[in-house]
Amino acid sequence: MADHRDRILSREVTATQIPSGDKQTLFAGDKVFIHQVLGGSYTVQTSTGLFRLDGKDADAIGEQVADTAVKGDALADGSPDPEAVWAQLRQVFDPEIPVNIVDLGLVYTMDISKENDGGHKVDVAMTLTAPGCGMGPAIAEDAKGKILLVPGVANADVRITWEPPWNQSMISEEGKMKLGLI
């Protein structure tokens, strides 16, 4: 009997290979196994390896495409609500770790500034758990895409930095509990 996580792709999709971060086409008819569903994306395994599938492609594996609308409005001055930005960042996951990037301690700073045209930009400095992580650009792009959904955000930049180096002490108490570290 097949596991409820075994699926057959109903259409072609572009997925991100884990851990290299390379884009690869998965074809209709390919068999996948859903390992993890977090932050609206799917970590799936095929006969050729692990991949991250964006939530917009959930229908290809027989899942419901998630509503990406952000609850709330911009603040009275038109600027984005910082709490809404942090909430979006908590929807971003390294596909190999079941804890969001905020609770992992990967987000160092989040700043909101007003641009010359009156719009608002969000700048995020984040790191990764290891310098060789090929998923870095994909994780940063996921964060940027989620930030851009926040009302009042016109532009976003997510920059990966290695200073200070990340270590496990940066993980939140909630993150440590999820990882079984406490």
Image: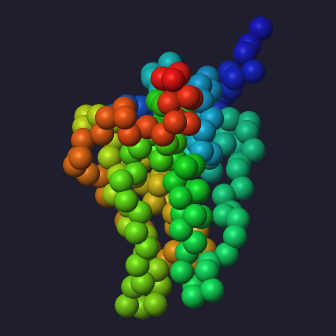
- Relative to 126, say whether 13 is above or below: above
Outermost residue, top direction? Answer: 1
According to the image, what is the colour scheme of the structure? rainbow
Residue 94: give x, y in percent of width and height: 46, 38
**134 or 112, nearer to the observer:** 112
**Within the image, what quadrant is residue 169 found in?**
top left
**41 or 101, nearer to the observer:** 101
Q: Is residue 18 visible?
A: yes
**Within the image, what quadrant is residue 49 found in?**
top left
**52 or 75, nearer to the observer:** 75
The residue located at (54%, 80%) in the rendering is 79
Outermost residue, bottom direction? Answer: 117
**Within the image, what quadrant is residue 69 found in?**
bottom right
**Quadrant, the N terminus:** top right
Residue 121: give x, y in percent of width and height: 43, 75
Q: Is residue 15 visible?
A: no
- Relative to 74, say whether 33 is above or below: above
- Relative to 115, say whether 18 is above or below: above
The residue located at (55%, 49%) in the rendering is 90
Total labels drawn: 0
Residue 73: give x, y in percent of width and height: 67, 75
Residue 54: give x, y in percent of width and height: 56, 45
The residue located at (70%, 43%) in the rendering is 59
The residue located at (53%, 58%) in the rendering is 86
- Relative to 95, say whether 112 is above or below: below
